[in-house]
Image: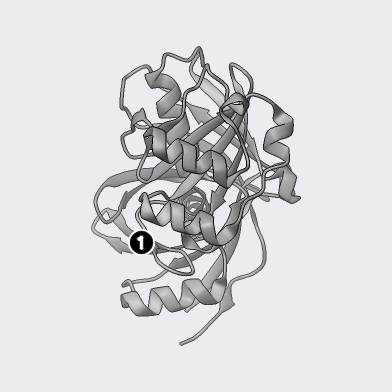
């Protein structure tokens, strides 16, 4: 099985969030995809096979299948462009259709995804209280301009906006308790953010639900956060930039374009780097 390892949302020639990408003629059995994802060891691996004019795509983290993954979709877009040429590729996920545009320009590759439709709602008080306790935070640490919310752009995320960058930088939590909290509330990640200005946001995304302490760049959460900001009439002026991964030594940069239509798809884009040549794993 040919596996590409591609870092998405890079900052220059460094950083980004690594994803596995497997392009195949027919998707392998579920247990085989799960085994490969565990062996690759990244937060997600995308498996894609052609079906008509589209690509059937499934995403697997080391411990489970996930409904949608932004950085793996960006990596997939770059892989498709590298193999089949620049263009917009239609992707058929388990429950929704999205698209990704891949481009190559010499040694530089980039991609832009169109997320599933977005929605958000206020986070339940009990969940917020439990999350604050998990991260050793208090209600006074929250930015009142961006109230806690459950946001979705293909997967569920709890959004907590902090009032200082320092509180974000010093994020820590008990992994076992974090995993239990996320799984019991159906959360893909908890998106901790600091709003530096109207169009610049710093983010950290614990992903204990699937065995990852923290994700270096999270396109699905970026789309969900952007959809939520649109819902509360944030003055984004059509786009925001999210910086993530700096505190992990894996600096990542995500550009997020936001239409004015409530609930509409969000465009998330970034550059990529191919981490190595295609490797062969398994049969």
Q: Which residue is mark 1?
A: 58
Residue 257 in view (yes/no)? yes
Q: Position of residue 167 (x, y in %)?
A: 69, 34
Of residue 147 and residue 195, the one placed in the foreground of this image is 147
Q: How many dots with numbers? A: 1
Residue at the outermost bottom position = 283
Taking the spot 60% from the left edge, 53% from the top edge, the residue there is 214
Rendered location of residue 243, percent (x, y): 65, 35
Q: In this image, 265 relative to 95: left or right?
A: right
Left or right of 43 on screen, residue 119: left
Residue 232 versus residue 10 in the image, above or below: above
Where 271 sits versus 25, above or below?
Answer: above
Q: Is residue 37 above or below residue 191?
A: below
Q: Quadrant of residue 49?
A: bottom left
Counting from the top left corner in percent of width and height, residue 203 is at 61, 37
| Residue 54 located left or right of residue 210 | left
Indicate the colouring scheme: one colour
The residue that appears at 58% across and 40% down in the rendered structure is 270
Q: Nearer the viewer, residue 203 or 22?
A: 203
Q: As rendered, which of 128 and 250 lies closer to the eye?
A: 128
In the depicted structure, whether residue 198 falls above or below residue 2: above
Q: Is residue 114 visible?
A: no
Q: Position of residue 67 (x, y in %)?
A: 34, 54
Q: Quick one: SS at disc 1?
A: strand
Q: Residues within 10 Å of mark 1 (few under 14, many from 20)?
A: many
Residue at image point 32% right, 27% down: 264
């Amino acid at each position: 099985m040919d596996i590409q390892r591609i870092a998405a949302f890079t900052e220059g020639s460094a950083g980004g969030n690594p994803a596995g990408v497997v392009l195949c003629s027919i998707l392998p059995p579920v247990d085989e995809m799960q085994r490969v994802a565990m062996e690759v060891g990244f937060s997600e691996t995308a498996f894609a096979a052609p079906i008509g004019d589209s690509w059937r795509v499934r995403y697997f983290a080391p411990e489970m299948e996930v409904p949608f993954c932004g950085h793996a979709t960006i990596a997939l877009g770059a892989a498709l462009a590298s193999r089949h040429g620049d263009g917009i590729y239609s992707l058929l996920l388990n429950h929704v259709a999205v698209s990704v545009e891949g481009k190559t320009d010499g040694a530089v590759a980039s991609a832009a995804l169109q997320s599933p439709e977005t929605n958000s709602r206020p986070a339940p008080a009990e969940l917020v209280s439990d999350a604050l306790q998990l991260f050793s935070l208090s209600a006074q640490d929250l930015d009142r301009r961006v109230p806690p919310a459950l946001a979705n752009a293909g997967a569920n995320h709890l959004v907590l906006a902090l009032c200082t960058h320092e509180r974000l930088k010093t994020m820590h939590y008990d992994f076992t308790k974090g995993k239990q909290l996320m799984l019991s509330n159906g959360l893909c990640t908890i998106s901790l953010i600091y709003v530096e200005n109207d169009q610049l946001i710093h983010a950290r995304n614990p992903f204990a639900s699937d065995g990852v302490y923290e994700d270096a760049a999270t396109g699905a959460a970026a789309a969900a956060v952007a959809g939520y900001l649109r819902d509360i009439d944030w003055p984004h002026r059509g786009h925001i930039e999210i910086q993530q991964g700096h505190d992990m030594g894996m600096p990542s940069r995500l550009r997020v374009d936001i239409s004015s239509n409530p609930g509409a798809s969000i465009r998330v884009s970034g550059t990529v780097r191919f981490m190595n040549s295609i490797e062969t794993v398994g049969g």
